[in-house]
Amino acid sequence: MSHLDQALAVTEPHLGVAYPNPTVGAVIVSPSGEVVGEGVTEAYGGRHGEIVALDAAGPRARGATLYVTLEPCSHHGTTPPCTDAIVAAGVAEVVVGSRDPNPVAGGGMERLVAAGIEVDVVESFESRRQNEAWRTWISTGRPFVTYKVAATLDGRVTVPDSRWVTGEESRRLVHELRAVSDAVAVGMGTVRADDPRLDAREVSVRRQPRRLAFGRGPLPEGSELELRTGSPCDELAALGAEGVQSLLLEGGPTLATAFFADDLVDKVLVFVAPTLAGAGQRLLGDLAAPVALTRLSARPVGDDVLLQAYIHEP
């Protein structure tokens, strides 16, 4: 494992803790190759990952190499600039996993170079992935949108005479996805058919997502969903302005097709069940043109297979 990979591994269990800030991991390695400090960004208002690692290293940071998953900040926000602390600690080299897309906080690498510190930018996908929602939100003003759908092997989203398409393990994973999303959304067709709750249940959750219904009302009596009646583009801009960084789009196919038509879907998660439905609604409607996917991966989830791919990489 490289030292940057180690910084990524240190970060992974803590993703989301620093919301609305990105979560940053750092590892400090002495000239002899010894890891002398590790750190992850603390809860909002706390120390950034670089500072936690520098505090752990103390004087051993002098002449060392700092591996950090995101470009160190050079502005004074809720905490002082990380670049100032890095320079003051006498760090000799900084290896950066990804550039900071925030125009306010960026410029950290230039500040370090000006101070005589060697800087190497790796720009790794994994570093960007860890803060993919924040990166999209900070650069576009809208949430990062993940389209999640359960489908049979022949691409149907319902199975005759069955409430569920996929197995229990897949359904539990969906609750885990909700638990780490700022908002979850469906269309009014799904609301009328299923009256879904859309909350995260029987999993660890830091805060429940906002639960949204896109389309024309009215909502069923007693529904706890928020009705969003504007276009997907307008509503995403409004949600972004309200601090929503990630949206889990659970369908149905009509709403998902509208999001695809406006190029608003960033990632696709398809839970494929080992079933041939033979009939029923498909997972997506007709599109004006093919949509290219990248980073396609597949993994088993119980008896199902989860396909994941990106339309817009972070």
Image (cartoon, rainbow, N blue to C red):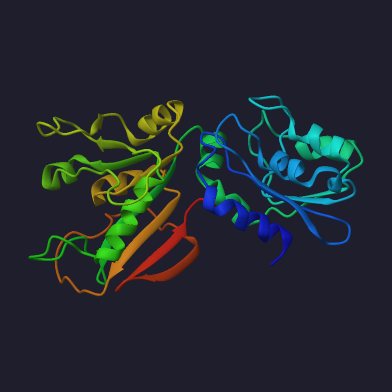
The foreground one among 307 and 163 is 163
Tell me if residue 25 comes above or below residue 209 in the rendering. below
Tell me if residue 95 comes above or below residue 75 in the rendering. below
The percent coordinates of residue 143 (x first, y second) are: 45, 38
Q: Nearer the viewer, residue 309 or 59?
A: 59
The x, y position of residue 236, in whole percent, is 39, 34
Q: Is residue 287 left or right of residue 48?
A: left
Residue 60 position (above or below residue 294): above
In this view, the residue farthest toward the right is 116
Identified at 30% across, 63% down, the residue is 170
Can the viewer see residue 287 in this picture? Answer: no
Q: Quadrant of the N terminus?
A: bottom right
Please state which of residues 183 and 17 is positioned toward the viewer in this rendering. 17
Relative to the observer, which residue lies in front, 207 or 35? 35
Q: Is residue 166 shown left or right of residue 243? A: left
Using residue 279 as the reference point, say whether residue 64 is left or right of it: right
Q: Residue furthest left?
A: 161
Q: Position of residue 310 (x, y in %)?
A: 48, 56
Please name the residue shown 29% across and 55% down the image: 286
Q: Position of residue 34 (x, y in %)?
A: 81, 60
- The residue that appears at 32% across and 71% down in the rendered structure is 302
Relative placement, left or right, of 197 versus 91 is: left
